[in-house]
Image: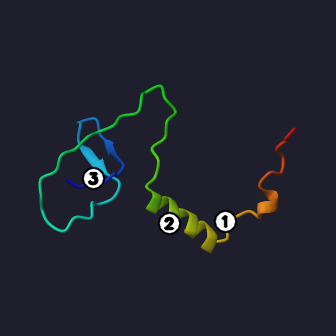
């Protein structure tokens, strides 16, 4: 059995909508495990490593970066 982790949303009818299509080669039945965040939790779902890389690469290409020398500006380390 192969595991694929994706994020999605459950609507008020209890229907699951994935944020992106699954990359599978054939039509097949699946088992689904749904992990819900606590309602009072500020926990955010983490992006997949691939999506995180894509976003980081996009930031580099578009110039949405900061020089390393500015990373600690405004932080008082004692």
User: Mark 1 and 2 residues: CB-CB less than 8 Å, in contact?
Assistant: no
Q: Secondary structure at mark 2?
A: helix
Question: Does 48 sit left or right of 25 as displayed?
Answer: right
Q: Residues within 10 Å of mark 3 (few under 14, many from 20)?
A: few
Q: Which residue is mark 3?
A: 3
Q: Is residue 15 above or below residue 30?
A: above
Q: Residue furthest top?
A: 40
Residue 37: horizontal and vertical position, in percent?
Answer: 41, 33
Q: Nearer the viewer, residue 75 or 9?
A: 75
First reached walking from the N terminus: tag 2 or tag 3: 3
Q: Which residue is mark 2?
A: 54
Q: Is residue 69 shown above or below 61? A: above
User: Of label 1 and label 2, which has the lower sequence position?
Assistant: 2
Badge 1 is on which residue? 64
Residue at 82%, 44% in the rendered image: 75
The CA distance from mark 2 to mark 3 is 21 Å
The quadrant of the rendering that contains the C terminus is top right
Image location (x, y in percent) of residue 69:
82, 61
Q: Could you tell me which residue is drawn at 67 percent across and 70 percent down? A: 63
Q: Residues within 10 Å of mark 1 (few under 14, many from 20)?
A: few
Left or right of 32 in this view: 72: right
């Amino acid at each position: 059995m192969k595991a694929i982790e994706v994020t999605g949303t459950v609507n008020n009818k209890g229907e699951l909508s994935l944020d992106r299509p699954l990359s599978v080669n054939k039509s097949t039945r699946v088992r689904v495990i749904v992990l819900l965040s606590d309602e009072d939790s500020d926990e955010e779902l983490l992006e997949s490593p691939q999506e995180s890389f894509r976003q980081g690469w996009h930031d580099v290409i578009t110039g949405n970066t900061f020089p390393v020398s500015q990373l600690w500006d405004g932080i008082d380390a004692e």
